[in-house]
Image (tube, rainbow, N blue to C red):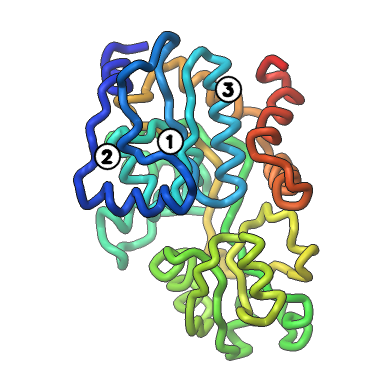
């Protein structure tokens, strides 16, 4: 482990006061510790503490737990920190308050693109994963972030309606929904209002009239239930959602390819977590994880009601990546 990384993980600086307030609100909602508590005193032996960031949806939580366990197996002291969304955890990652997050190539690329060049910046993401990762690195590295290789597992944003709503309006694609001229209330995260792949993309690419965002989160049971009940007409979820049938929902095809290559990959704070040992440990996951694995992992949490930590452990044991 480099002395720079060791120092960075041993002496954390506090976030600016305004940012701490915003992050504390998100952390309180998740029941997690404040980032101010990520300190360097009394950490003990081993290779040091690693904080893995997680967004507030199932797949991110499971992936963070998977990262945590392989890093523990490599001799680190991992801790998972859940924040609501990328708007909260990405700045913390830049500051070294979080060391690593499981990410999605094109979505993060566009997030950083908008952060650097404004909300109306020319898109840089691509359906070609190689190009998407290359653009992501260009945007991430100047911010002190290290982008590790992407694997085969991919998960894209997706939009679903009830089977009845689809049949009533003859909907199979998002283009069909736009042509139907139905006014839509969308169950999603608050950030959907400005994300290029969410409300702005639905309106610009498909001509869908989104009258409002119902802030129930990405693919949460509450969001899907709101569509099932007719409170909302459309829900933002993902292509690896394993419980759509439980709610009588069906995905609408993204026929104009609004969503780009969103292969899963780890993104690190280069200063606090740039060690080769960390990259080697996380590569073990990237090299075996598949899209089908993501679906099954999500199903175990969302349908079978197992804990993300338990699901992560069982998965790693099944792959022979950690000791039982």
Q: Is residue 48 above or below residue 291?
A: above
Label 3 – label 1 distance at C-alpha: 15 Å
Query: Does residue 25 show up?
Result: yes
Tell me which corner region of the image, top left, top right, bottom left or bottom right, holds residue 182.
bottom right
> What residue occupies the far top of the structure in this picture?
45
Q: Position of residue 147 (x, y in %)?
A: 41, 34
Pointer 3 or 1: first along the chain: 3
Q: Is residue 107 visible?
A: no
Residue 52 shown left or right of residue 253 in the figure: left
Q: Is residue 116 left or right of residue 76?
A: left
Label 3 vs 2, first from the N-terminus: 3
- Name the residue at 37% across, 54% down: 25
Cα–Cα span, label 1 and label 2: 12 Å
- Where residue 299 sits: x, y (%)? 74, 48
Q: Find residue 19 and report its horizontal and vertical position in percent.
A: 25, 49
**Residue drawn at x 68%, y 28% as measured from the top left:** 313
- Name the residue rendered at 50%, 69% in the picture: 215
Q: Would you name the residue on which mark 1 appears?
A: 267
Spatial CA distance of label 3 from label 2 is: 26 Å
Q: Nearer the viewer, residue 47 or 280?
A: 47
Secondary structure, mark 2, is helix
Of discs 3 and 1, which sits in the foreground?
3
Residue 10 point in image, percent of width and height: 30, 19
Residue 70 badge? 3
Q: Nearer the viewer, mark 3 or mark 2?
A: 3
> In this figure, which residue is indicated by the disc labeled 2?
143
What residue is at 31 percent from the left and 27 percent from the top? 39
Counting other residues with Cα less than 10 Å from the Cα at mark 3, is it few (<14), some (14-19), or many (20 or more)?
Answer: many
Disc 1 is placed on an element classified as strand
Q: Quadrant of residue 37?
A: top left
């Amino acid at each position: 482990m480099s002395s720079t990384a060791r120092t960075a993980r041993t002496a954390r600086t506090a976030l600016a006061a305004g940012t701490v307030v915003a992050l504390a609100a998100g952390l309180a909602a998740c029941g997690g510790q404040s980032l101010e508590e990520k300190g360097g005193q009394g950490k003990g032996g081993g290779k040091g503490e690693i904080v893995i960031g997680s967004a507030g949806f199932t797949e991110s939580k499971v992936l963070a737990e998977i990262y945590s366990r392989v890093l523990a197996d490599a001799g680190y002291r991992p801790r998972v920190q859940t924040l609501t969304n990328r708007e909260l955890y990405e700045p913390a990652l830049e500051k070294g308050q979080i060391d690593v997050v499981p990410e999605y190539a094109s979505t993060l690329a566009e997030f950083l693109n908008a952060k650097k060049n404004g909300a109306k910046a020319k898109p840089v993401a691509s359906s070609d994963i190689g190009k998407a990762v290359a653009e992501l690195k260009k945007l991430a590295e100047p911010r002190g972030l290290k982008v590790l290789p992407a694997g085969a597992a991919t998960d894209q944003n997706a939009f679903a309606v009830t089977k009845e709503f689809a049949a009533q309006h003859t909907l199979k694609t998002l283009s069909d929904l736009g042509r139907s001229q139905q006014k839509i209330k969308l169950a999603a995260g608050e950030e959907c209002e400005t994300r290029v792949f969410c409300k702005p993309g639905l309106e610009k690419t498909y001509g869908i009239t989104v009258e409002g965002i119902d802030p129930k989160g990405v693919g949460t049971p509450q969001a899907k239930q709101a569509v099932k009940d007719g409170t909302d007409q459309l829900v933002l979820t993902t292509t690896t959602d394993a419980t759509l049938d439980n709610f009588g929902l069906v995905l609408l095809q993204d026929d104009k390819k609004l969503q780009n290559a969103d292969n899963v990959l780890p993104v690190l704070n280069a200063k606090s977590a740039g060690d080769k040992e960390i990259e080697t440990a996380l590569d073990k996951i990237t090299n075996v994880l598949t899209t089908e694995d993501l679906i099954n992992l999500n199903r175990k949490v969302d349908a079978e009601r197992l804990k993300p930590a338990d699901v992560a452990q069982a998965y790693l044991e099944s792959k022979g990546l950690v000791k039982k």
